[in-house]
Amino acid sequence: MAQTPLPPRVILLMRATTYRARPFLEAAARLGIEVVKGIDMPPELAEYWHAPLGLQFDQPEQAVEAIVEFARRNPVQAILAVDDSATVLAALASEALGLAFNSSEAALAARNKYRMRQLLSAAGVPCPNFRLYDMADNPTQVAAEVEYPCVVKPLLLSGSRGVIRANNPAEFEAAFRRLGRLLASMQRVPGSTGILVENFIPGFEVALEGMLDRGQLKVLALFDKPDPLDGPFFEETIYVTPSRLPVSVQTEIADCAAQAAAALGLRQGPIHAELRVNETGPWLVEVAGRSIGGLCSQTLRFGPDVSLEELILRQAVGLEIASWRGDEGARGVMMIPIPGAGLLKRVDGVEAARQVPGIESVEITAQLYQPLVPLPEGESYLGFIFARANEPAEVEAALRQAHARLHFEVEIMLPVLQ
Ligand code: ADP
């Protein structure tokens, strides 16, 4: 009698607190894929919690060994990272097991902003002039060397953390010191004390969500970001898809993102790229080897009920993909900005915001009585508003209207680092 084939098994690398795990787990359940959670925690703690695979993401050699050992006993088809925290580990472990994925060099280049700029500029992908400094450098001296306006940024953080625009030497010194303090407050890993300074790229911004399939880019969605992102900090707010840009500009953007992925050596799986566009065309801000962050993937559907995570899992285990195209209509999300540092004491207007035509959901993710830390030091939003309508302009209007109905009471009590 023929044996029933075992369901495919994937390891999903995640931090214990991520929002990104749930949609992957839901999609895996739909597809009958067994997911083993590779959670960033010391193995002793994992044992205590009965987690099958505790891994320390900051100790990649041991983590790869643990994954290889696990996979020897429980064969896996793919190793995926739900966000930036483990894209390099996923690539290293895939290499060790001979699974087709991005090389670890490519994954590393997509995580390190300096390495990324080196590879992009060597390949002729439009990107700003850049120079690498260290937090120990003298800001006054550096301020005299750089061009203005410019942007200072850390090499390894994400979500615009630590990214600050400076228009003149005085602003530069303050920005450099502020980023230096943020870096000093964090755990040191190789590369974490670097400060990248690059020319400010004028223009408006878009985000491209795509999948690489053996090096070929399939664009899943292009998001317009209708709020200007001109600094001094770069807090994301509204994303709306499909883009309202002319098709010719959208094609240039996709070509630029594809060139960037190729320059880094990314070949397989999801990418999320940020580009700025001005009269000279698209410029690459960043391309990451992962899918869109936070809860934002809820804006994407590929056929009835097919989520972005389902697409990623299907590709990873070699299941058929019926459509790479997003479904009809327009969708958008607002990442609700943090109005100021302090304690969140009360949130009003959520029901009223939900009543705005076109609004699909309002999710407040910040916890009451927890400190709110805005950018450039912080790393989260108050929550997310989702909208759906026939046209992108209606989605944008609904998101703004819903946001206007929300009221956040924040007790100012934390000193803002200057
Ligand atoms: P992160 O990985 O933390 O998101 P990015 O390098 O993508 O860091 O920068 C975050 C945001 O800062 C970008 O989306 C963009 O709005 C802005 N930004 C970064 N670099 C530049 C630049 N050189 N010129 C203009 N804006 C920039």
Image (spheres, grey):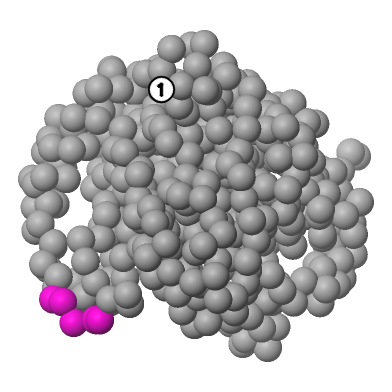
Q: Nearer the viewer, residue 75 or 170?
A: 170
User: Foreground residue, 220 or 8?
Assistant: 220
In the visual, does 79 lie left or right of 204?
right
Image location of residue 36, percent across then percent down = 68, 61
Numbered marks: total: 1
Which contiguous range is marked in magenta? 411-415
Check disc 1 and report the residue beneath it. 243
Q: Residue at x 55, y 66 (%)?
A: 142
Determine the image quadrant of residue 366. bottom left
**Quarter assignment of residue 119:** top right
In the rendered image of this protein, does residue 316 appear above or below residue 208? below
Task: Specify few, some or many for label 1: CA neighbours under 10 Å numbering under 14, 14-19, or 20 or more.
Answer: some
Residue 333 visible, this orientation: no
Residue at screen point 69% across, 49% down: 116
Q: Secondary structure at mark 1?
A: loop
Looking at the rendered structure, the kind of residue marked 1 is Ser
Is residue 126 part of the magenta span, yes or no? no
Residue 293 percent across, percent down from the top left:
48, 50
Instruction: Please state the horizontal and vertical placement of residue 406, each as a whole percent of the image.
Output: 12, 52
The residue that appears at 77% across and 71% down in the rendered structure is 60
Q: Tell me if the residue at label 1 has its CB under 8 Å from ligand 1.
A: no
- In the picture, the quarter occupied by the C terminus is bottom left
Q: Main secondary structure of the magenta part?
A: loop
Is 413 contained in the magenta span? yes
Which residue is at the front of the view, 316 or 123?
A: 123
Q: Position of residue 339 (x, y in %)?
A: 20, 61
